Image: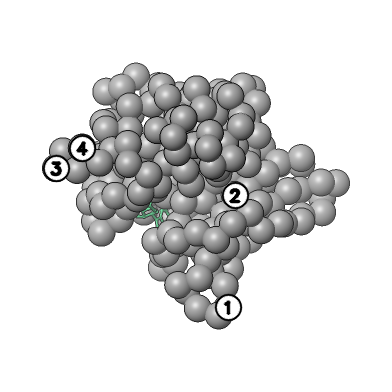
């Protein structure tokens, strides 16, 4: 997966490639789909949700440019796979998931595999997780119609946030944006088109 799919498609950060090599993706995929764990595509998990495609996980992780001393916030734990990849690269990860069954399952998988620097919180991630804010890195794994203001607020000075955003033209079209906060000013650039499940707002 690392050589054929990631390196060849622009993932150049060796730390990210090493993290992707070391996380056993098959452990996060439903048993019936294990043979596809290392195919470069998203797969269905419980509650009508998906585990993201490896290339997208790697590209979003690379865009965050994590330092070992950083702590990161993820919105949309899903299977817990992306959180495990982040946990390889920084000090602490908090991941918020609104489906309680998924949150519980992700927490159990991460615990079983020894990722003791990941905290899974069952809640609405559109409000972020103020207790540990501000975050040098935020990764949103579900597509937002507009960027939740709480997430911009909880981004640290010099921090980065990768978030898929629905384009006004239609929810089918989404762009992955990278936000950066510098001297209190937040700017963003478009990285590439993506397709995520929606960020559900209650
Ligand atoms: N990162 C996951 C894939 C996430 S799929 C992985 O590696 O497997 C998107 C997830 O976002 C789903 O599990 C969905 O339940 C969750 N989600 C959607 N809206 C949310 C919200 N407002 N707050 C928290 N989680 C949300």
Taking the image as shown, residue 138 lies to the left or right of residue 115, namely right
Q: Position of residue 199 (x, y in %)?
A: 44, 62
Q: Residues within 10 Å of mark 1 (few under 14, many from 20)?
A: few
Dot 3 falls on a residue whose secondary structure is: helix
Category of crowding for the residue at label 3, using alpha-carbon neighbours closer than 10 angstroms: few (below 14), some (14–19), many (at least 20): few
Front-most of 147 and 193? 193
Residue at image mark 1 = 168
Q: Secondary structure at mark 1?
A: loop
| Mark earlier in primary sequence (4, 1) | 4
Query: Residue 182 versus residue 119: which sits nearer the camera?
Result: 182
Left or right of residue 80, residue 14 in this image: right
Q: Residue 11: percent from the left, percent from the top?
A: 57, 36
Q: Which residue is mark 2?
A: 162
Q: Residue at x 52, y 66 (%)?
A: 174
Quarter holding residue 40: top left
Q: Looking at the image, can residue 95 be seen?
A: no
Instruction: Find the distance from the CA under tag 1 to the CA under tag 3.
Output: 37 Å
Secondary-structure class at tag 2: strand
Q: Which mark is residue 35?
A: 4
Mark 3 or mark 2, whichever is nearer to me: 3
Circle 4 sits in a helix, a strand or a loop, which is it?
helix
Most distant residue in the bottom direction: 169
Tag of residue 32: 3
């Amino acid at each position: 997966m690392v050589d054929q799919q990631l390196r060849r498609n622009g993932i150049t950060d060796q730390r990210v490639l090493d993290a992707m090599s070391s996380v056993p993706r098959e452990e996060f995929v439903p048993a019936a789909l294990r043979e596809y764990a290392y195919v470069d595509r998203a797969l269905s998990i419980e509650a009508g949700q998906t585990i993201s495609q490896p290339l997208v996980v790697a590209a979003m992780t690379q865009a965050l440019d994590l330092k070992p001393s950083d702590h990161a916030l993820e919105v949309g734990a899903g299977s817990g796979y992306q959180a495990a990849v982040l946990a390889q690269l920084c000090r602490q990860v908090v991941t918020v998931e609104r489906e309680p069954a998924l949150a519980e399952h992700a927490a159990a998988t991460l615990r079983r595999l020894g990722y003791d620097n990941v905290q899974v919180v069952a809640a609405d991630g559109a409000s972020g997780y103020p207790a540990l804010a501000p975050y040098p890195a935020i990764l949103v794994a579900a597509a937002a119609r507009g960027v939740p203001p709480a997430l911009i607020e909880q981004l640290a000075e010099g921090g980065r946030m990768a978030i898929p955003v629905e384009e006004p033209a239609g929810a089918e079209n989404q762009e992955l944006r990278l936000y950066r906060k510098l001297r209190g000013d937040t700017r963003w650039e478009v990285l590439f088109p993506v397709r995520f499940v929606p960020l559900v707002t209650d």
